[in-house]
Image: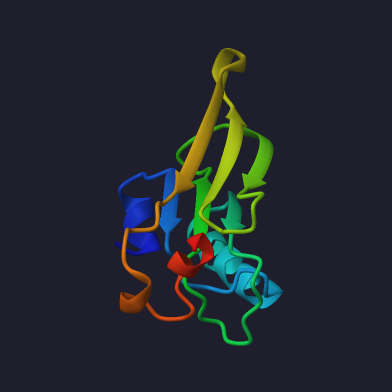
Amino acid sequence: MNLAECYNQCIALIGLAETNREWNKPELQTQLREATHKIWSASVIQTSTSSEQFEDNYKPGGTATIVCKDHWTCRLLEKREDPWGLGRWSCLLLSGKKSRKVLWVNGYRVCLASAASVGKTTTYKATI
């Protein structure tokens, strides 16, 4: 499903796991922000990625958590990401009607595999 289809379906929360982007590069953050702002008048984005630096735009793992505000009214209270530098989760804490709080968490768990069956740059390597 692309962003325009998400808009047409009135989707307000988008969670992307294993985005495979080097989110430490500001230009990739800008591209995602511009893509969402072409569709929604307002949105909030929180990404996560591992602390290992990549020259390329491709980087295994990572998440993107997006709140699109055209179909949903809320106030952003807090943005968080994986503090351990593994890039496995990101979240947004939102405030809604009657001071209700919603914590939107987006993450993934690395699949179990043997070290011999995965490449040297996979997120699995972070666990061994």
**Residue ranking furthest to the bottom:** 55
Q: How many marks?
A: 0
Is residue 41 or residue 107 the one in the foreground? 107
- Would residue 92 appear left or right of 116 to someone viewing this image? right
Image x and y of residue 8, in percent: 33, 52
- Would residue 89 appear left or right of 8 to someone viewing this image? right
Confirm whether residue 48 shows in the render: yes
- Residue shown at 32%/68% (left/top)? 114
Is residue 61 or residue 10 the one in the foreground? 61
Q: Is residue 109 above or below residue 69?
A: below
State the colouring used for the structure image: rainbow
Image x and y of residue 93, in percent: 60, 34
Confirm whether residue 19 shows in the render: no
Q: Is residue 72 above or below residue 10?
A: above
Image x and y of residue 14, in percent: 43, 50
Q: Quadrant of residue 111?
A: bottom left
Is residue 52 or residue 93 the one in the foreground? 52
Q: Quadrant of residue 101?
A: top right
Q: Is residue 109 above or below residue 35?
A: above
Q: Quadrant of residue 85?
A: bottom right
- Residue shown at 51%/54% (left/top)? 88
- Residue shown at 56%/82% (left/top)? 57
Image x and y of residue 41, in percent: 57, 52
- Residue shown at 58%/12% (left/top)? 98
**Residue ranking furthest to the top:** 98
Q: Quadrant of the N terminus?
A: bottom left
